[in-house]
Amino acid sequence: MELDGTIEAVAEDLRRAGAVGGAETARVAELLVAAVEPTLRLHLLEALHAAARELEASAPGVTVEIRLEARDPVMSLVRSGPGSAGGEEPGEAASAVADGELLRLTIRLPEGLKSCVEQAAAAAGASINSWIVTALVRAIDAPAAGWPHVNRRLPRRMTGFVQG
């Protein structure tokens, strides 16, 4: 969704309104146009976010994602739950964790893995962030078999005999 057209339309309305009052008012209107562009863009993004939340509330199992590409928002509809392209619904424990407060996390990935994650997210029609969160929730729900025990201590007792 391009915001530039909407912002330019509002700017043109301000210029026309300023032209009615003469040269000095037109100059003030032009200064206002320059000053209001960033805040207008922010308010439009906030309105899109509010609209997305309303849509999500009216359609259970659907998430509306908004991400920025360049300076323009891109909206995507992501279905979750049974029947979605992603598979089964996450379990209760992982869902409770996933529904908490959002925090920023920086991770370092090998370049090849990053490319694979980008391709998988694109194939799923999701953002990279959303795809990673979904993968983590599924990993938490999966049985622990096969996962390495990172904090497992090795036994301290040794058995056997020594010859010598």
Image (tube, helix red, strand yellow):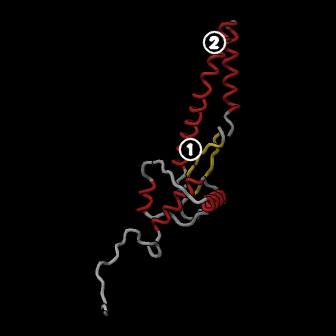
Q: Is residue 61 left or right of residue 34?
A: left
Q: Is residue 12 left or right of residue 53?
A: right
Q: Which residue is mark 1?
A: 52
Q: Which of the pair 35/15 is nearer the observer?
A: 35
Find residue 116 and report its horizontal and vertical position in percent.
63, 62
Residue depicted at x 61% and y 55%: 126
Q: CA distance from mark 2 to mark 1?
A: 36 Å
Find residue 94 and report its horizontal and vertical position in percent.
44, 61
Q: Residue furthest bottom?
A: 163
Q: Residue furthest front?
A: 164
- Looking at marks 2 and 1 on the same chain, the residue that comes earlier in the sequence is marked by 2
Q: Which of the pair 137/150 is nearer the observer?
A: 150
Vertical comparison of 37 with 2: above or below: above
Q: Which of the pair 23/20 is nearer the observer?
A: 23
Q: Which residue is mark 2?
A: 28
Residue depicted at x 31% and y 90%: 160
Q: Is residue 164 left or right of residue 65?
A: left
- The amino acid beneath tag 1 is Ala
Q: Is residue 45 left or right of residue 156?
A: right
Corner quadrant of residue 36 = top right
Vertical comparison of 116 with 54: above or below: below
**Residue 110 disc label:** none
Corner quadrant of residue 72 = top right
Find residue 44 and report its horizontal and vertical position in percent.
59, 33
Corner quadrant of residue 148 = bottom left
Vertical comparison of 103 with 40: above or below: below
Q: Residue furthest left?
A: 157
Quadrant of the rendering where the N terminus is positioned: top right
- The amino acid beneath tag 2 is Val
Vertical comparison of 128 with 44: above or below: below
